[in-house]
Image (cartoon, grey):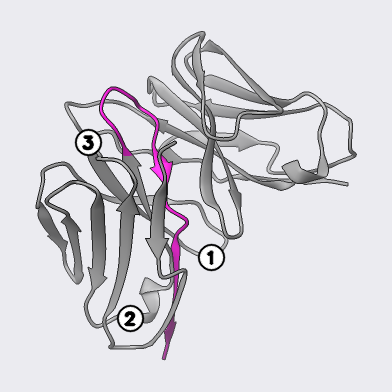
Amino acid sequence: GQQVMQIPQYQHVQEGEDFTTYCNSSTTLSNIQWYKQRPGGHPVFLIQLVKSGEVKKQKRLTFQFGEAKKNSSLHITATQTTDVGTYFCAGTTSGTYKYIFGTGTRLKVLA
Amino acid sequence: DAGITQSPRHKVTETGTPVTLRCHQTENHRYMYWYRQDPGHGLRLIHYSYGVKDTDKGEVSDGYSVSRSKTEDFLLTLESATSSQTSVYFCAISERLSSYNEQFFGPGTRLTVL
């Protein structure tokens, strides 16, 4: 079945450093979503990417969708303590409304 | 936050007992999902619904059943709870607007099976 792998599993950074998490799917995706979950909270939608090679930015966050639509990345520039949490990607294939989530990357930012 | 609630928020039960978790939405969204979250596994889809009385299985559906008799309610039932079903359960809703179908998550239910 479809699998979505996410690396790294954990990342500790000093405040101000950059952070990147990578998402890789075993199958071609029709779109991919990114979510953030704060400790003790629920996942909150960040963005959706649909087009091959698409790049979207939200302030310090940059999201990319690979040319083959099988991988994606989230890059945070100059991390802040408010960036702490677990970041998940979630992909779906054509003709279905099922999303398969990656295992998540837990980000810890040291002040 | 979207109008989505889950009940109960916490539950402790014993192995072999039936358990029903409820997800209630006030957004009139068509799609509803049940996920479980466990350390090292992220979020795994249990069942989802694409309309009233229309449901389908997800990745980890064994031991779970669902029902959706009204747009606003999606019930998840563990017929005979096992310790492996100890987890945090999240309900999510979404509505398809062109190609945009953001999922809104409920606050979660922490279930412990002793």
Q: Tell me the chain of label 1.
A: A
Q: Residue at x 42, y 31 (%)?
A: B93
Q: Is residue A2 magenta?
A: no
| Circle 2 SS class | loop
Where residue B87 appears, as percent x and y from the top left, is: 68, 48
Q: Which residues are magenta?
A: A92-111
Name the amino acid type tagged 1: Pro
Between the C-alphas of marks 2 and 3, the distance is: 32 Å
Q: Is residue A36 left or right of residue A55?
A: right
Name which residue type carries label 3: Ser
Labels 1, 3: front one: 3
Residues at discs 2 and 3 both on one chain: yes
Q: Say which quadrant the C terminus of chain A sits in.
A: bottom left
Position above or below: B68 against B110: above
Q: Chain of mark 2?
A: A
- The relative height of residue B21 versus residue B13 in the rendered view (above or below) is above
Q: Quadrant of residue B84?
A: top right
Q: Earlier in the sequence, mark 2 or mark 3?
A: 3
Q: Of marks 1 and 3, which one's residue comes earlier in the chain?
A: 3
Q: Which residue is mark 1?
A: A39
Q: Is residue A30 above or below residue A8?
A: above
The label on residue A30 is 3
Identity of the residue drawn at 55% across and 46% down: B107
Q: Earlier in the sequence, mark 1 or mark 2?
A: 1
Q: Secondary structure at mark 3?
A: loop
Task: Decide: few, some or many residues near mark 2? Use Cα within 10 Å; few <14, some 14-19, many ≥20.
Answer: some
Per the image, the residue denoted by label 2 is: A80
